[in-house]
Image (spheres, helix red, strand yellow):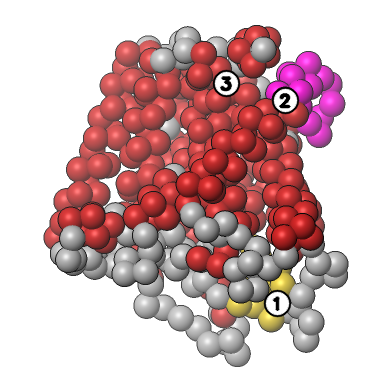
């Protein structure tokens, strides 16, 4: 039944099928990470993680989720270029990016924050990934007017150079504290006596990633040679991975240093222990490179049934995002009512495998609703607001 549903609403081309499939994969990794944050909150991880206190299974699960934000932001930029190719061009792209960016920022302050906190009125608003994507889209609405070479150069410069700013900080009383907290220095912003904002996702590196995604758009142009595109994805991914390993081995720049640990597993954990808030050069290099290679694999495997299953999740990302947050919150409150606090001040599971099991079960349970909404988007193109989800 699942396979039949997936086939009933495929994206129009193999090119788009691979993009939606990759987006669907990282959405499922995101689900895993949010199940962890819901039911394993008593074993919260730091950023980067503490190797001495983080077991390998938990470290792997969290590291796997590192793919989510960079790949999703990259694909957002790529999808914006494809939107422009499909419609009138840069003017339409710029207007759509600006409006959808504002819509996402509004969602972060309202439905998303309520889903995380269940608090009205809120005392804390966490400005997280939806906020970062929204502001990145607003920035890209201006950057699309640049020549492609200049946009690509600027995006790579931001990605490569933003770690040079890690030592720049401004005190709360400084006029630069708020804009710098939003751009690069993760911190707190006091709005008043009863409301604080947490800039969990500093913006600057994400502007580089979304710009890079947009600059890669011509690889996926209508009529572009598939073999050449796949070679470009392969070379880009390999070059990025070589850059990651080269810089990481010499401990020179782009990430906090690592060292040889007592065991091989811990040494590997230390090597791949990368910083997400804000995403370091090596965080972006590793995750985006893997994303490019996966995009190539998915294009070459686009006739596989599991690819089509992934595209269902990837074709309705915002719907899934909101749906899974509220489902997780309701499930947590139900578990709390039934079993009470069993992990200090939280209800939670005892093991990482339980997190994986719940994630798989939720993916299966939410699939019909996501497929229904994906089919609705495809069928009712006359409803303008649906394209924002």
Q: Residues within 10 Å of mark 2 (few under 14, many from 20)?
A: some
Q: Residue at x 49, y 54 (%)?
A: 351
Q: Does 189 appear above or below 331?
A: below
Q: CA distance from mark 1 to mark 3?
A: 40 Å
Residue under circle 3? Answer: 309
Residue 37 percent across, percent down from the top left: 58, 58
Magenta region, main secondary structure: helix
Element type where label 3 sits in the image: helix
Where residue 336 sits, quadrant-wise, is bottom right
Instruction: From the image, state whether disc 1 or disc 2 is nearer to you.
Output: 2
* Quarter of the picture holding the C terminus: top right
Q: CA distance from mark 1 to mark 2?
A: 38 Å
Element type where label 2 sits in the image: helix
Residue 252 percent across, percent down from the top left: 19, 64
Residue 45 percent across, percent down from the top left: 46, 65
Q: Earlier in the sequence, mark 1 or mark 2?
A: 1
Q: Earlier in the sequence, mark 1 or mark 3?
A: 1
Horizontal arrangement in the rendering, residue 132 relative to residue 230 (left or right): right
Which residue appears farthest toward the bottom when viewing the image?
Answer: 173
187 vs 85, nearest the viewer: 187
Q: Residue at x 49, y 30 (%)?
A: 22
315 vs 106, nearest the viewer: 315
Residue under circle 1? Answer: 196
Q: Residue at x 30, y 63 (%)?
A: 255
Q: Earlier in the sequence, mark 3 or mark 2?
A: 3
Q: Does 30 appear above or below 384?
A: below
Residue under circle 2? Answer: 368
Where residue 113 sits, quadrant-wise, is bottom right
Residue stretch in magenta: 371-386
How many marks the image carries: the answer is 3
Horizontal arrangement in the rendering, residue 14 relative to residue 274 (left or right): right
């Amino acid at each position: 039944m699942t396979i039949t549903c997936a086939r009933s609403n495929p994206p129009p081309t193999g090119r788009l099928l691979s993009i939606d499939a990759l987006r669907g994969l990282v959405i499922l990794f995101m689900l895993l990470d949010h199940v962890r944050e819901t039911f394993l909150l008593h074993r919260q991880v730091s950023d980067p993680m503490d190797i001495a206190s983080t077991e390998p299974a938990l470290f792997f699960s969290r590291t796997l989720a590192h793919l989510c934000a960079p790949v999703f932001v990259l694909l957002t930029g790529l999808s914006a270029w494809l939107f422009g190719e499909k419609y009138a061009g840069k003017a339409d792209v710029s207007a759509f990016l600006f409006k959808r960016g504002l819509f996402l920022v509004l969602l972060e302050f309202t439905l998303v924050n309520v889903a995380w906190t269940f608090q009205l009125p809120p005392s804390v608003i966490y400005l997280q990934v939806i906020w970062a994507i929204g502001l990145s889209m607003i920035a890209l609405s201006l950057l699309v007017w640049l020549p492609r070479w200049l946009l690509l150069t600027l995006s790579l410069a931001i990605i490569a150079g933003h770690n040079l700013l890690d030592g720049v900080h401004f005190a709360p009383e400084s006029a630069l504290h708020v804009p710098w907290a939003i751009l690069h220095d993760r911190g707190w912003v006091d709005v008043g006596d009863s409301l604080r904002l947490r800039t969990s996702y500093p913006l600057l590196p994400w502007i580089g990633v979304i710009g890079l995604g947009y600059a890669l758009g011509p690889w996926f142009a209508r009529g572009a040679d598939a073999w050449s595109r796949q070679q470009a994805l392969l070379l880009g991914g390999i070059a990025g991975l070589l850059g990651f390993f080269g810089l990481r081995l010499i401990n020179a720049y782009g990430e906090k240093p690592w060292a040889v640990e007592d065991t091989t597993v811990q040494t590997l954990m230390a090597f791949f222990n990368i910083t997400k808030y804000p995403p370091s050069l090596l965080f972006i290099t590793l995750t985006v490179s893997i994303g490019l290679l996966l995009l190539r694999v998915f294009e070459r495997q686009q006739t596989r049934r599991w690819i089509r299953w992934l595209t269902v999740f990837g074709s309705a990302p915002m719907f899934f995002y909101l749906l899974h947050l509220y489902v997780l919150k309701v499930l947590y409150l139900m578990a709390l009512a039934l079993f009470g606090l069993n992990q200090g001040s939280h209800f939670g599971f005892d093991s990482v495998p339980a997190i994986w099991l719940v994630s798989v079960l939720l993916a299966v349970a939410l699939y019909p609703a996501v497929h229904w909404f994906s089919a609705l988007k495809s069928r009712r193109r006359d409803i303008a607001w649906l394209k924002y989800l």
